[in-house]
């Protein structure tokens, strides 16, 4: 048993935590202030066990490590434990992952060539495992979550039970048709509308140019520096019972946000992609819409630019 624990790189400290334990008692590891802060819950959290990292965990090993923790505990709990639940129970971890964003690091004066080599869990960092009440509560929150994209607004929202938790800028598909070697045909690049759900998550994505189907070995940033491609999960939704190839994924060039620029995918900042990932496990509802009439910052109705020239009464 001891050797098995060492192999997954953790020491498990199981003990009952008093009901007064709160989110802010969990250890911090390089958190970053969210650009769209969400008020953390004020209820008392219940943590049944602590998992302590016995070695540094880089991002390239992070998912396997988290899976090993979830698998070790899943049979011991009265609900299905997952990487998503562990991260949601330890929000500092999501903040730390968001902070690996190349541009966040550059603002701190750090040039990062290989994001996958960054240490996300340091030796001694600990994660709390939620008890049955807290775990089921987190599952209910995930089940009540919708990923909402309004195409002409260039905005993705994370909505939970009708409340908008986050609002992120995105890029969308171009208003043109083009031959894509990846598809083997001429493709309408406009981002399609419809409702559906997340069908696939790729935690080890390959970066490929759909125009010529050639993989990217490196990426050129907005500051003209070249880095390795980051390891951040991509989400594939099914829209209208079809997989349109419209992924939700990070872009290494945030200057393209707020534009019709992509081959149909929804591109986001690296930091924002981590937050979407941990709010959208497989099965999460997705809505892609084309609403031209929106509520502006002053509370009045605003008509957006009709980027796909779809002008119809009602703004759709």
Image: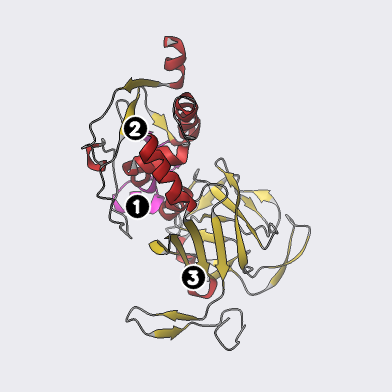
Classify residue 176 by image quadrant: bottom right
Q: Nearer the viewer, residue 295 or 17?
A: 17
Asked whether residue 115 is drawn in magenta, I would say yes
> Looking at the picture, how far across and down is residue 81, in whole percent?
47, 34
Q: Is 297 on the left or on the right of 179, as rendered?
A: left
Counting residues from the start of the chain, the first of labels 2 and 1 encountered is 1
Tag of residue 154: 3
Secondary structure beneath dot 3 equals loop
Picture quarter with the N terminus: top left
- The residue where tag 2 is placed is 127
Image height of 161 relative to 295, above or below: above
- Residue at 39% from the left image edge and 63% from the top image edge: 163
> Looking at the picture, how far across and down is residue 276, in whole percent?
46, 53
- Residue at 44% from the left image edge and 57% from the top image edge: 269
- The residue stretch that appears in magenta: 97-120
Query: Quick one: which residue is furthest to the bottom in this view?
Result: 313
> Looking at the picture, how far across and down is residue 167, in whole percent?
40, 64
- The residue where tag 1 is placed is 104
- Residue at 60% from the left image edge and 44% from the top image edge: 206
């Amino acid at each position: 048993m001891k050797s098995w624990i060492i192999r997954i790189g953790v020491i498990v400290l199981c003990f009952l935590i008093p009901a007064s334990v709160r989110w802010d008692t969990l250890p911090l590891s390089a958190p970053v202030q969210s650009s769209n802060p969400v008020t953390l819950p004020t209820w008392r959290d219940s943590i049944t066990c602590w998992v302590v990292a016995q070695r540094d965990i880089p991002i390239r090993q992070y998912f396997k490590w988290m899976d090993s923790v979830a698998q070790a505990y899943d049979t011991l709990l009265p609900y299905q434990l997952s990487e998503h639940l562990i991260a949601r129970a330890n929000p500092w971890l999501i903040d730390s992952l968001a902070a690996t964003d190349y541009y966040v690091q550059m603002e701190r004066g750090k040039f990062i060539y290989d994001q996958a080599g960054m240490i996300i869990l340091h030796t001694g960092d600990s994660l709390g495992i939620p008890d049955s009440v807290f775990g089921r509560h987190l599952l209910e929150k995930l089940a009540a979550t919708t990923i909402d994209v309004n195409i002409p607004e260039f905005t993705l929202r994370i909505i939970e039970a009708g409340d908008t938790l986050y609002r992120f800028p995105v890029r969308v598909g171009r208003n043109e048709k083009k031959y894509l070697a990846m598809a083997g045909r001429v493709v309408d690049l406009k981002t399609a509308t419809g409702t559906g759900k997340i069908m696939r998550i790729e935690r080890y994505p390959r970066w490929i140019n759909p125009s010529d189907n050639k993989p990217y070995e490196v990426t050129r940033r907005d500051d003209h520096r070249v880095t390795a491609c980051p390891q951040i999960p991509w989400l594939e939704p099914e829209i209208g019972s079809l997989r349109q190839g419209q992924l939700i994924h990070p872009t290494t060039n945030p200057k393209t946000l707020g534009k019709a620029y992509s081959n149909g995918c929804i591109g986001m900042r690296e930091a924002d992609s981590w937050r979407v990932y941990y709010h959208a496990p497989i099965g999460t509802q997705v809505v892609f819409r084309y609403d031209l009439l929106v509520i502006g910052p002053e509370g009045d109705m605003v008509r957006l630019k009709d980027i796909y020239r779809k002008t119809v009464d009602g703004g759709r």
